[in-house]
Each structure stands twice: as C-alpha cells, then as structure tokens.
Image (cartoon, coloured by chain):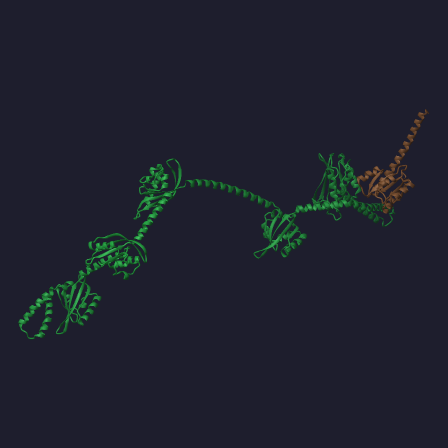
Chain colours: A green, B brown
Amino acid sequence: MKSNMAGILAFSHVGNRKMMREKEGTDAEVQDAFVESGIRLRKIFENLSEAVIYIDKYGKILDLNRKALELYGGSKEELLGKHFTRVNIFSPKNMLTLMKNFKKILSGEETRVNVSFKNKKGQNLSLQCSTYAVRINGELDGFLVILTDITERRKAELQAKEAREYAEDIVETIREPLVVLDKDLRVVSANSAFYRTFKVTPERVEKHSIYELSKYKLDIAELRTRLQQVLAENVAIEDFEVEHNFPKIGWRIMPLNARRVSSKTNKEPLILLAIEDGTRRKEAEKELLFQRKLFDALMDNIPDAIYFKDAESRFIRINKAHAMRMGLKAPEEAIGKMDFDFYPLEFAQKAYEDEQNIVKTGKPLLRKTERIVDKNGQVRWVSATKVPIRDDLGQVVGIVGISRDITKLKQMEKKLRKYSQRLEEMVKERTRQLRKSEEKYRRLIQHIPDVTWTSTQEGKTIFISDNVKQVFGYTPEEIYRKGERLWFGRIHPDDLEKVKKAYKALFEKGEPYEVEYRIRRKDGKWIWLYDRARTTYWNAGRRYADGAFSDITERKELEERLKKAERMAAIGSTAAMVGHDLRNPLQVMMNLVYVGKKIVKSMPSSLAFKPRFEKICEAMERQVQYMDKIVSDLQDYARPMRLELAETSLLTIMKNVLKTLSIPKNIEVAVMVPEDFPALLVDSHLMTRVFTNLVLNAFQAMPQGGRLTIEASLTDKEALVHVKDTGIGIEKENISKIFNPLFTTKAKGQGLGLPVCKRIVEAHGGSITVQSTVNKGTIFTVKIPLRQEVKKGG
Amino acid sequence: MDKTKKRILIVDDDKDILESIKEILEADGYRLDTAENGCEAIEKAKNNFYNMALLDIKLPDMEGTELLTQLPATTPKMMKVIITGYPSQDNAIRSLNLGADAYLTKPIWPEKLLEVVENKLREQEEIEEMSQAKMDELIQARIRRLEKEHGL
C-alpha cells in the first residue's frame, strides 16, 4: 500500500509542480480539488486494462500501474527508481528496438512497436508498445509507455499462418495441376504441378480468366454452367472430361474436378479446380490392358504350368497348360481347389509343405525337380519354381508357381548320359589303343639302332637318345657330363682326323656330315659307327647340328669277311700260278741244297771251312723247307679239297710228320699214341699236312725251347689228338682269329697254316679247337670221327 | 741193281732243273740224258734206250701227258714218271691212264726222288725178270703142247 501511495504521489507530483508553476500561492480549496482529482486519476491509472509505465527523461522508472506489474510478474519495489534498461526483462534485440523508438519519440513521432519478453514467471509475452513523450510547459518531463498484451493474438495469427502454409504445401505437393479461381473465374493461384504440366509461367496465368488460358477451348457451355453451379449452389464437378490439343504439350484428355471453397477471411467464394492429366491415366489403362493381354497370352500359350495360390495353397488362377496337365477342361475349374484334389497324396502333401514354408519364411523355392505320378499313373518330371506373392505391406499372401515339364529333358538327359558314358568308354578305349601304339612306338624307338643326337659346334653333346646306352655303353647323362672329350677320346686314332674334318666341314662349309668310324665302347669293344648330319642351325646364339648314327659293326664285319673272301678268291686264282712259278725255282734250290750238302760231305775233314759250309747248307735246307711249306699251304688252300681216304695209322702219320721236320735241339718231343689205337679213315697226305702245321707252330711258339706232346685219346665217336706245347701262348683277343686266313702273329707267315688245318679237318667231318694261356702254352685238339661217313669235296 | 747200267732221260724246259737233277742222279750212279722239249725227248728216245723218263707236265711244245704216248715203246718197258707243278687229280688220273708209272709233284726232295727212281727201276727189273720167266714158261708150255699135239 505504501508503494502505491508513493506512485500516486509521484504522479501527482508532476501535476503539482505544473500547477505550482502555473498558480503559486493557491488556496487550500484548490489544493483539495487537486488531491481529489489526483486520487481519481490514480484510480483510473491503476485500473486501466493497458499496462502503463511512466519513465523520466533519463529512463528511470517513476511509476507503473497494476496491469504493468501483472505483466512483469514481480513487486513494484523491484522496478521503481530503476533505469528501464536495468530491469533485465527485455532481450538485447528488444532493447535496441526500444532505444531507437525513444529517439523517434524525441523527434516528435508517436511510435508503436511490438516487443517480446520473458517475465519473472517465465511466460513469453508479446507486447505492443506505444510510447508518448510527456512535456510540461513544453519541456520533456518523461515518457508514458503503454503496453498492450498481444500474446494471444500473435498465437492465433501464427496458427492461421501455419494452417495456410500447410494447405499451400499440400496444394504444391499434389501431383495434379490445381488452380484456384475467384468468382469471376480468374486464376488466383496455381500450383507448381500446373505450371509444370502446361509449361506456362505464373505471369501468364495469374489474374487471367480460365478460358483465356486455353484460348477459349475450355469455353464450353456445359463447363460454364457447371462452374456457375459450383459458385452458386456449391455443386462439385467430378471427372468432367475435356479434350484439348495444347500448343506445347499436345493432345490431352483431362478429367476436371472442381469444388467451391470459402474462407473466413475472404468472403468471396473461390473455386478449386483440379485438372487431371487424363491422357496419362488413359494411356496407363491402355497399357494395363495391353499388359493383361500379354499376360493372358503368356498364360494361355506357355507350355509351362503356371498357377497362383493363396496363402492356404488354394488355386486362385491357373493357366491352360496347367489345366491340361491336371486333366481339366478349363482353368477356372481349379479355382478354390488344392493339389490334394488332383495329385496323389504323397506328392500333394510335399508340395503343400513346400508352399506353406514359402508363406512362412518368404523364401522362394527355385527349380526343384519333382517326380509326379499323375492320376493315369504316368510318370512326369517337372522343374518347379515357387515364389511368394506379397501385398503392399510385404506380407506373403500367396505364391506363384511355374512348373516346367522336363520329362523329355530327363529322357534326353538319360540318353545323353548313356551316350556320354559310351563316349567315355570309347575315349578310354582309344586312349588305351593310343597308349599301346605309343608304347609300341617307344619300343620301336628304343630298339631302332639309330641313335639321334644334338651337338654344339665344339662337339659337346646336349642331347642324345637313350638307346645310345645299348650301342655305346655310356648313358646320355654320362655323355652330357663328360663332354666332347669322351666322344672324341674314344674314336679310333686312325679315324679321328677324318671325323673332325667332316664335322668341321659341316659347320663351316655346310657340307653334309657323313662318316664311318671306329669307336671304343665303354666295355672296351671296338664298334663301327655310321654317323651323319645334314644341316646346322642357330639357337639362342649357339650353333647346333642334329644327327644320327647307327652301329654298323656287323655290316663292317660282313664287309670285312667279304673282302677277305674276295681276297681268298684272288689268292686262290693266283695261287696255282704262283705255286707253279715258285715250284720250279724251289725244285732247283732243293736240288742244289742236296748237291751242296753232298759236296760238303765229301770234303776232307781237314778243311777248315767245312763245318761252316755244313751250317750254310742246313740253313738253306731249312729255308727251302719253309718255302716249300708256304707254297704247299697256298696250293692246299686254293685247291678244291678232294679227300683220298684210306685207313691210316695215326702213328704212321706222326712218324712222317716228324721225319720231314728238323726238330730244334732245345725241344723235347713226346708222341703218346697207344699201340692199339684204331686206324683212322683219313686222307693221309692231308692229315700229315695238318699235323705238320700244328707241330711247326708248336716249335715256333717255343723259341726258348720246351716240350711238345702229341697225345691221342678216344671217345665213343671221335679220335682226339692233342698237340700240346709249353710256348708263349696266344693272346686272348687273337684266339678267335687264328683260324682266319691270312691272320698271323708271326713276322714270317702268311696266316694260311691253321686255316688249311681247319679246312682239312672239317672236310673230314671233324673239328679243331684251341686252348691257350699266355706264357704257359697252347693245346690244339683235332677231333676226327671214327669210321663215319665223312664230308667229301669242299 | 747196277745203277750205272740204268739210263734215265729227264725232260724239262728249265735248264737249272735239268742240270741239278742230272747231277743228283749221276751222283747216285745213274746215267743221265736230258731233253728241253717234247720233240727232243722223242728224238732221243728213238735213238737211245732209256730205262726211265722223268717228264715235266708242261713243256714248250707239248703236254707231258701227250709225250707219254709219243715215246716209242721199248723193251723192257720204259718207266715214265710225271713231275708236275700243277698237281691235280685230273692230271694224275690222266697221266696214269696214259701210261705213267708214277706221279710226283714239284718240288720234290731229292731224297724222295731218288727213292722213287730206285723203286721204279727195281720194279722194272722185276717185271722184266717176271716177263722173262713167263716167256720161258710160255715157251715151255708151247713146246709141251706142240709135243703133245704131235705126239712127241
């Protein structure tokens, strides 16, 4: 109460000062009247529905009424005497507005601004602030601020605005063109869909008549009437179709919908006109129809069975193919039925379970092969695909299934499997054959005598076929490892130059390399190779030759034998002549030696040179003897063998043999032939030759002296005569050759002796063999058949 | 056997052979004559008696075998020995068929030759003796038959 009084006092103080300046020294009555008027003013001031605040010219709050205090929400003491900017109720922005406001007021304007603030109770208030300058005697005293609470009004305005914007948003977002027309059917506004659809700008549309827009094409009597009805009677237009060829968008069928709308603010009625683009819908309908036709055509003509079922596996629709498969006359007969009605229980049950599983899980069943036995007992194979059908909410409401008859496919598959099995067998068989032929080929390669090789210019072998092992004794690996030295190192020294020269000529002159040479095998045996290569080539900067060689040892030996045989023939043909030619001189010499010996014998012993002459004669006799033997051998060998068989005592032959030979003094001779040894049916002359040769050989094998043993023994069928010496023996490698004609180890010898022996003995149906140990001696064994038919001629 | 009374003819175109054999046989006591070809041999044999002829099978004017037939028959029959440098069975058989008494191949050791010569001459003597005895016997038998026929 005290504060109220102070406020009024403050207010009256203004009046008092004014009045006092005007009327100084007034009486009490006047004073009472002033008090009364002040109290009345104060009451009015307090009860004003507007909040009133009085601020001095410096901004200090001097007074405020109840309504102002109510708005503030605090006590009067908190405000009185405080500068209004310190009250802390206005936001800085409002404060700025107010300050500007005061300046305007000072320049004589009345201002009204809206401000908002948060009061002590936390309420957000919107206030309309009207400020008036109070002047006393033309001098600014303060400001009267009247605040009107407009919070409720602002709220309502905001709501209205929101509602409008919401509505506008809806209109804007509607896909169909919309126009709002006023009562004169002029366009008030249009949505963006309208502008988009008709490709026009707002300037050309707004304020124009709806008929102008369409160049009066929409000026149809019925539409006019209808629009008037909308305005007057609020009768809506629904799907009124108009057709029009628009300049920019072409022919259009447009169903029109119109409603009258009226607003509270605008008393004039408006028409909301929706212009649907019916063309698109029409096209969509047409498209849909076409799609349906396609679908029907597909359904009716596809050989696959197609069906739609609801969530309980009841048929909704099936196609013709499915109907036929189920033995129905028309697809409609299946509707509402289930697989159980058409198929055996087991199959239907399985299908049902599958379908229910799809309904439950939404997982499709893809290409499941199913075996169906239909009512006729016929087995069919189908490939079934079932997928869920969902409604707009994604809920599975049924399934669609496609069942393809793959019975034929299955049969084909079976056939194919059978064919492929057969094919596989054939392939296997063929492979086996190929492998066999390959094996054969490989064996052939392995057994083919030709060895193929590839060598560098330097003669290093980089490839050689495996069969080299058979021919050469070394494996390819050994040959690669040991390099060219191995090869060239084992070539016969007599052939080496020839080989090197030919190999060089191959690389340097391109002359075909073709050479025969001897080479020593790993086991030491000499073999003949026929080696050849035609050309050379470069590879990776090196020069190579590919070639092949064959083992021609056998051929060479044959050639050698042939050569020898030819030589023998030549010897044979000349032997007679030579023999004759030598026989005469030999005869003369024999005679002269005999004469010479006789002469020497007749010389008196006193003659000093008599022994010397004797020696000369003996030596001459020996040499003539030897010459005689050569001539005889030659002739014996060349002459066709004709045996003059006669029963002959071996002992006699031996005696004859030894009689004609002069036995060296350092050799002991023992003949061991039993007295009762049977007579042999032989040509005694030739047999004498045989043993003469053998004994002579024995003598020659014992130059240092030794023992010669001639021993005879018997088997059931043969007489064996061993001629045994204790001489130098025969080298192992020569043993096989000693019976070859013209082979000799003697410095003086034609190599005919043993061949002649062999020939003679064999002509008798016997054989001659030899055993020998070097430095121990040699045994020749002559085997002569006992009284048997013997070979004649030869 | 008195070798000095035995006359031998050697026929060979090789003079050295002729000379050397002549020397050997003469040294042994025989009386020798030589001929260098067939004609000379025939001529000599016509004019002289030889106990033996040693014939080379190849002569400049004829074959030794031919010479065998050309030599005149003698009494006692001449021993003909063929010595050949071409020993062959054919030659040997032919020689023997044509009247050769021996067949020797060149070269022949002188000792052997001497042996053959001596043997053949001894044989000749035996034949001669035998034929003499036979002749005697024949004459005796003839006489006896005549005596018987004539009742003597």
Instruction: Give the quarter of the figure containing the C terminus of chain A.
Output: top right
In the rendered view, tell whether residue B98 sits above or below residue B140.
Answer: below
In the rendered view, tell whether residue A207 sits above or below residue A684.
Answer: below
Quadrant assignment, res B131: top right
User: Relative to the observer, which residue lies in front, A416 or A557?
Assistant: A416
Residue A790 on image: x %, y %: 74, 36
In the rendered view, tell whether residue A16 sits above or below residue A494.
Answer: below
Quadrant assignment, res A172: bottom left
Residue A334 on image: x %, y %: 33, 39
Identity of the residue furthest to the right in this view: B152
Identity of the residue furthest to the front in this view: A221
Q: Is residue A117 left or right of residue A345?
A: left
Q: Is residue A356 left or right of residue A706?
A: left
In the rendered view, tell whether residue B125 sits above or below residue A52.
Answer: above
Residue A764 on image: x %, y %: 74, 38
Identity of the residue furthest to the top in this view: B151
Instruction: Give the quarter of the figure containing the N terminus of chain A.
Output: bottom left
Numbered marks: total: 0
Q: Is residue A137 left or right of residue A781?
A: left
Q: Is residue A98 in view?
A: yes
User: Relative to the observer, which residue lies in front, A178 or A615?
Assistant: A178
Q: Is residue A665 in view?
A: no
Residue A316 on image: x %, y %: 32, 42
User: Relative to the observer, which residue lies in front, A181 or A623?
Assistant: A181
